Image (tube, grey):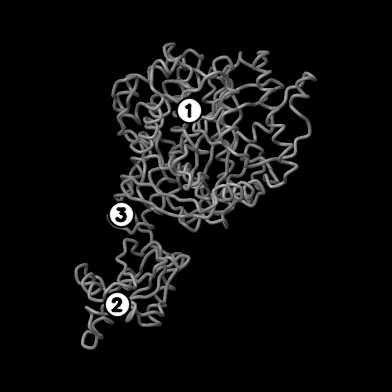
Amino acid sequence: MGEMITSNTKDAEERMAFVQHLIDDVETLELLLQNEMFEDDVVRVGAEQELCLIDKNYRPYGINLKLLNEIDDAHFTTELASYNIEINLDPFELKNNCFSLIENQLRELLQKADDQAKKNKAHLLLAGILPTIGKKEVGLDYLTPIPRYFALNEMLKAYKGDDFNLKIRGVDELYLKHDSVMFEACNTSFQLHLQVPSHDFISSYNWAQAIAGPVLSVCCNSPMLMGRELWKETRIALFQQSLDTRRTAYALRNQTPRVGFGDHWEEGSVAEIFKKDISKHRILLTKPIAESSLQKFKKGEISKLPALCLHNGTIYRWNRPCYGVGNGKPHLRIENRYIPSGPSVIDEMANFAFWVGLMKGRPKVFDDMPSQMDFKSAKTNFIKAARSGKETVFLWCGELYSAKKLILNKLLPIAYKGLHKCGVDEEDIERLLGVIEGRTKGMTGEQWQVANMRTLKQRFKTDKSLVLLTKKMVENQSQNLPIHRWEHVNLENIRRKPKLVKEIMTTHLFKLHEDDLVSMAQAIMQWNGIHHIPVENDQGDLSGLLTWSYLQSLATTTDFNNTKVSEIMIKEVMTASPEMEIGSAKTLLGKHDIGCLPVVLDNTLVGIISRKDI
């Protein structure tokens, strides 16, 4: 995502040239495979760490370009949102103390970033979804101002032809329409890379698909978005919907989403995967390319296949095939994209070791996945894991297993075997896979977040609970403990005073429509013991307000059974914004001698604040 692209596909000549380079790249890839020119005698691992930047109030902080300039380290790069950055770790050969080396580098780079963040009164947070992200932070004002991101947004919007729809149902429900791809920016991941021999790529890839559900179930760390408790790993649904360019008008036609798990076991070679992706997905981004990869191949040079890699970077498979060149030699990798960031560095490294161990410990019987498992079972397992986390019941090779039983009895032994086979240090194996065992028997990141959010909401409104939850996550991450040993929030120790309207406003609202009868409004107020009800028009915008005292003043002169709300409502309504300081809201209430302020964002009612709340 960090590549500096300055144009999209609107330039016809550049697009035509790019298409030819893309075709040449596929042909070159096939020639490399036929001639067995891949680096197949070495196995390397690598990772990308995405993380959140938050301010002193634990809210998104859009300073990534400023921070990256101050850090001044090539390991760091931008992300889509200005409150996210990414760390690209060095590749290490899979042997000996490689996981300790990766962990040490990650900690050093995080410390480097944290030192600069503190100078800007900021914090770093590892979280699949930052709890305090709100509607404001998914606006284009928070898009990192780099040409590639603007080009990507423009092309996806053009292909969609309409707003992006977001509808996720869990314990709560979130339904939103949005005019950009910025919801994708809510996701932060810990992306894992494993170099795979070219001759074993398809078997490895299919095995990676098969284990994805069980691995995800014990790694979930993204249960909430905008205060709603949704999927155990909400990133999976959020990412797919935030980049879904399929048009609903063609609902009867099978369309492959840009973000997805796949539709079948793969066959042939890695080239066949790339061919299908090119065939099914339109080109989003292009760039000028100086020389054809075929021409380079004929001269004995190894091309980086730039057109193929750029297009592949806009296809978001949860297990993504990758081509690269290192030290003049081409190699193939599988990129695991479904693992969330956090909850802690040690948890992430445990996830890494667990996945790599499983990949390298694959029992021979799974070399041919179609003979062992139906693909739809693997795909169903993945979706179920994202929805249910560690509570999932998996169908594995025709038998039902709880996540706990499958991981402890089947998969962990494979992972131990795989890491031992690669010569990984015993100390690292026991330490990291021990974390997976502890988390499987104990608590995952999503379980910790949900339990503590529910505790906080016993005493606080939603927004303040999210802030306090984020604060506790920052504190716990600094303790260098795995999630199953994290401390929980203690309500008795919380003394933080709220500052903004959104921290104390009521968000579960009773609302009226302009066409409702006043008698219904009066009944709703009586039944629920409330003194203020906002009124909305047909567009869902705030259009008025009814108060109990106002209704009482009209009781002797108005027939409530035959009067519409729109005929008597207060139309000149004083409002507040979610970001308004509580002191300013208090002043407004006093100045105008009113009992409440509807809270509005872009003319949409999002809450209400009363004298009682203050």
| Residue to which mark 2 is pinned | 564
Q: Which mark is residue 352?
A: 1
Q: Residues within 10 Å of mark 3 (few under 14, many from 20)?
A: some
- Vertically, is 176 above or below 545? above
Residue at 65% across, 20% down: 30
* In the displayed structure image, the side of residue 263 where residue 117 appears, left or right: right
Amino acid type, mark 3: Lys
| Residue to which mark 3 is pinned | 457
Secondary structure beneath label 2? loop
Labels 3 and 1 touching (C-beta < 8 A): no
* In the displayed structure image, the side of residue 76 where residue 318 appears, left or right: left
Q: Residue furthest bottom?
A: 557
Amino acid type, mark 2: Lys
Q: Position of residue 555 (x, y in %)?
A: 22, 84
Secondary structure beneath label 3? loop
Q: Position of residue 164 (x, y in %)?
A: 49, 51
Labels 3 and 2 touching (C-beta < 8 A): no
Position of the C terminus by quadrant: bottom left
Labels 2 and 1 touching (C-beta < 8 A): no
Amino acid type, mark 1: Phe
Q: Position of residue 354 (x, y in %)?
A: 44, 24
Label whose residue precedes the other's in the sequence (2 or 1): 1
Q: Quadrant of residue 193?
A: top right
Image mark count:
3
Residue at 77% across, 24% down: 296
Q: CA distance from mark 3 to mark 2?
A: 36 Å
Q: Residue furthest top?
A: 364
Q: CA distance from mark 2 to mark 1?
A: 62 Å
Residue at 32% across, 25% down: 395
Secondary structure beneath label 1? helix
- Vertically, is 503 above or below 416? below
Q: Position of residue 507 (x, y in %)?
A: 34, 61
